[in-house]
Image (cartoon, rainbow, N blue to C red):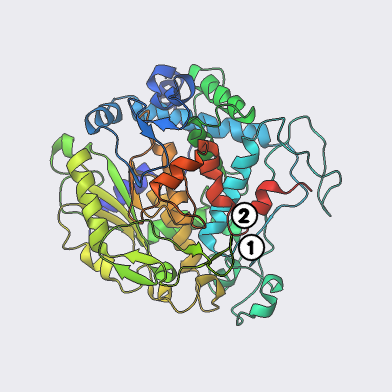
Amino acid sequence: MSDAAVRAYLAEHGAPSAASAAQQAALDACTVDQVPILQLLYMPCGAGMHGFACGVRWGVDEEFLPSPRRWLRQWGRPHAALCQRGFFAALAAVLTRAHWEQEWDAQPFRIAAVPPRTMGKMVHQLATANYYHFTLGPRQRPALRGSPAPGSRFRPLPQPGFRWNVLDFGGGGREEIDFERLSSMPGNVFSRPLAAGRRCAAVRAAWHCLWHRFPSQPLPHAPARGTAVAQAAEALYNASLAGEQPGGMMQYVAATSVFGAFTQPTQAVRDYLAEHLRAVCHVGGPYCGGGGGDAERTPVAAVHVRQGDSCDRKVDEPGPWNAMWRPDPKRPGKLTREGVGRRCYSWRVYRQQLQTLRAKYGVRTVLLATDDHTGEVVRALQGERDFNWVYLDYPRQQFRKRAWMEFRSDLDENAPFSLAAELELLSTADIFVGSMGSHTSRSVYMRMVSSSRTSQLPPFISVDGYGLCCDFTEECTREQVRGRARPVRECIYRFGAVTGGEQWMYHRG
């Protein structure tokens, strides 16, 4: 174990703080040319296309691995980290400022048992529902309700704000789940396990023990208003609000700003992360030092090793498309659960993908999240000497599959806290290995976009065969994805609209 590596990670990725005069001056001096991601706004590829040469049809494949030479050249530019981070901070400030006094829909996003049920799905659907309305465009955006919700303030304004905030009264305990009255039981899948812990005792709303209320979340320091980069952030916000470029990759920049707005961790989550963070250093690299300057200036990968209640059977090979549902032969047009169950993937599968990233991009340090209850994955890290490992050490035995997690009454606070802390941990990486058939993996990737230093979205490999333009209620072969020809905007929100999420997208009041 390396305490020094833990301290190095926490020092680099701590809570937002006030900028020094020198830091602010450096941010204010950034130019648009030093923010490569803005090419997605100002010099976009054709609709649905991405890559340095605009040759990648987005969402079709289960991986995106841009040219290593060009990607690494952009990634390593001196101003890439500072100015691009400043742009995303400026975009967060614009988003928050624009919605600070705007009205909300009369029905907030209710954190109840159903729908949606799972913790990861709740996070993903809240963000994608707001992204959907934010980028819908003024002609398609439905009017808000004509009367306020009980106890709320209603101020008609010309530009509506986000449609959904979080309504969470907390409550509930560790009583047995009654499936007959699941949706009316006190509490929810966050508050029930938190009720058994100590960290949220003084917070009535369980959700907001984990994530700050929008729009009062803390913001990172950003270029001052009126500077070139701040004006570019306003231009992207206005283009998104106007519904422009629905087929362009700019949509991911808008979406990452919404995900970041709703998943800013509270101090309780940051304390949990610091308390449970561990590092294993084998080679010179980021956070671990050693190996000379070049080794320390290498990209960091994130890996989400999905096991837990999503695992019906474990396999040793990646993909192919991992279906949860299939057409029901007895009911034309309907779906039924896949009879053989969902696959999860052995540690060997993830390790192979990380070796690919090491060969292509020089990855030496990996941020890891897993719900593997056996401890096999974490124990393996001591012997995986090609990489350094940063992960959270907490009790995972409760993740053993006995029933769907959200239907169990024996979970403790490690379940919601680990989700929030690992989402924050992995979002700071440059490259991703995960399962894009998972709401949690998709949320991690959407958060990672704001950590990008290049003109490209983060490189990724999806071990379960899912690309980023198909959901788990439909067939996802390459031919079918190409045939649907969905615009990028629909690719983003569609996964959040399944299994109950559509009510937040299409509700008309």
Please give the count of numbered marks on the rendered protein. 2
Q: Position of residue 108 (x, y in %)?
A: 71, 52
Q: Residue tagged by mark 1?
A: 115
Instruction: Tell which circle, 2 or 1, labels the residue nearer the N-terminal end.
Output: 1
Residue 86 in sight here: yes
- In the displayed structure, would residue 432 be above or below residue 178? above
The local secondary structure at tag 1 comes to loop
Q: Residue tagged by mark 2?
A: 501
Residue at position x 64%, y 80% from top? Answer: 178
Q: Position of residue 128 (x, y in %)?
A: 57, 46
Residue at position x 41%, y 67% from top? Answer: 342
Q: Position of residue 194 (x, y in %)?
A: 55, 69
Quote the CA–CA distance across marks 2 and 1.
8 Å
Q: Residue furthest left?
A: 291
The local secondary structure at tag 2 comes to loop
Dot label at residue 465 = none
Residue at position x 40%, y 22% from top? Answer: 26
Q: Position of residue 179 (x, y in %)?
A: 64, 78
Whether pointer 2 and pointer 1 mark residues with C-beta atoms closer than 8 Å, the reply is: yes
Query: Which quarter of the rendering shows the N terminus?
Result: bottom left
**Amino acid of disc 2:** Gly
Q: Residue furthest bottom?
A: 176
